[in-house]
Amino acid sequence: MVNSSHLDPHAASPRRVLRRAAFGIHPGEGALAWLFFLEFLVLTTVHFAGKSVRQAAYIDALGAERLPWVYLAVALISFPVLVVYSRLAGRYRLPILILGFTLLHVFGLTLFFYLFGTGGKWVAVAYYIWLSMAFAIAVSQFWTYANQIFDPRQARRLFAFIGAGGLLGAVLGGVLAYAVTQVTGTRHTLLAAAVLLLAVPLLVVLIERVKGPRPVAPPRRRHGRYEEARGGLRTLRGSRLLALIALLMLATVMVGQLVQWQFNWWVDITTDTLDQRTSMISIALSPVKMSWKKNPTTPTRLRAMLSIEVR
């Protein structure tokens, strides 16, 4: 007897069944889902590689005890930057904005590669603030773009899979920073990240081709956007549950910053050079085990510190 599934051209192959069960990807969604997965993977890899340099350079230049000042500077500068960006977002299509800001991001990474060669302490401060702003905008653009491409049902199924690209990127970013620092030095990590980031425009072009023409929603007036924001604030204030969730998120961010500051202080007092600090922070950003303890060129104090596994 012949199996009827072999005669039915619409019968799902085992690969499709596995992909749908494991990742929630339905037929016709695979190309877009994987393109967004790769884009988020690239963004987070670049960010965590750049973050390793950011933390190490600031600690090396000014010390971990002065990190709260740059936290405050980032908070103060964020508001005017986001106001300017919101005005640009109302004038240009999101894919165009992503392409433009990605190229600016690449230029910024390359520029700071040369500026770090000058040895000025102000470069570490400027880079810390710039990278924080650049990645915040990039992530906001990415998820807004994904929200435009996928409908709510698709988003519930696919966003977990796409978000997994960010988890993998966090690992690869730490590995990239460690590898480049060991071979050529800390600041060359910025060049490697800039080259990798050039993949984002290509992925956006591919996404635009795969998704095809779609109806464009009419632009909202500025007054309408303000009213929507105020309505969201009223909803938050009127719901005790939402208010508690907001407070919990705020507390999580504050505790996370405190833990990060304590870790940076630990790196500051247990390492001696910029490359050591970058490598140590990159290890902490990646669960991959490194074998510094067995390296005879590693300082004794650092080898003793690395006997504690970082996961």
Image (cartoon, rainbow, N blue to C red):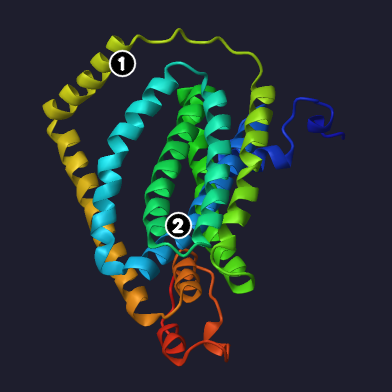
Please state which of residues 11 and 86 is positioned toward the viewer in this rendering. 86
Q: Residue at x 31, y 16 (%)?
A: 225
**Residue 242 image point, x, y percent:** 19, 34
Circle 2 crowding by C-alpha within 10 Å: few under 14, some 14–19, many from 20: many
Give amino acid for label 1.
Arg
Indicate which disc residue 51 carries: 2
Q: Residue furthest right?
A: 1
| 111 versus 257 height, above or below | above
Q: Residue at x 26, y 44 (%)?
A: 75
Indicate which disc residue 43 carries: none
Q: Give the distance between the C-alpha atoms of the residues marked 1 and 2, in whole angstroms.
A: 33 Å
| 301 versus 164 height, above or below | below
Q: Residue at x 24, y 45 (%)?
A: 249
Element type at marker 2?
helix
Please state which of residues 208 and 49 is positioned toward the viewer in this rendering. 49
**Residue 24 image point, x, y percent:** 56, 37
The nearer-to-camera label among 1 and 2 is 2
Instruction: Confirm whether residue 24 shows in the render.
Output: no
Q: Earlier in the sequence, mark 1 or mark 2?
A: 2
Give amino acid for label 2.
Lys
Residue at the spot of label 1: 225
Task: Using the rendered view, name the quadrant where residue 20 is placed.
Answer: top right
Element type at marker 1?
helix
Q: Is residue 44 left or right of residue 205?
A: left
**Residue 152 image point, x, y percent:** 45, 24
Disc 1 to disc 2: CB gap under 8 Å: no
Circle 1 crowding by C-alpha within 10 Å: few under 14, some 14–19, many from 20: few
Instruction: Confirm whether residue 240 shows in the render.
Output: yes
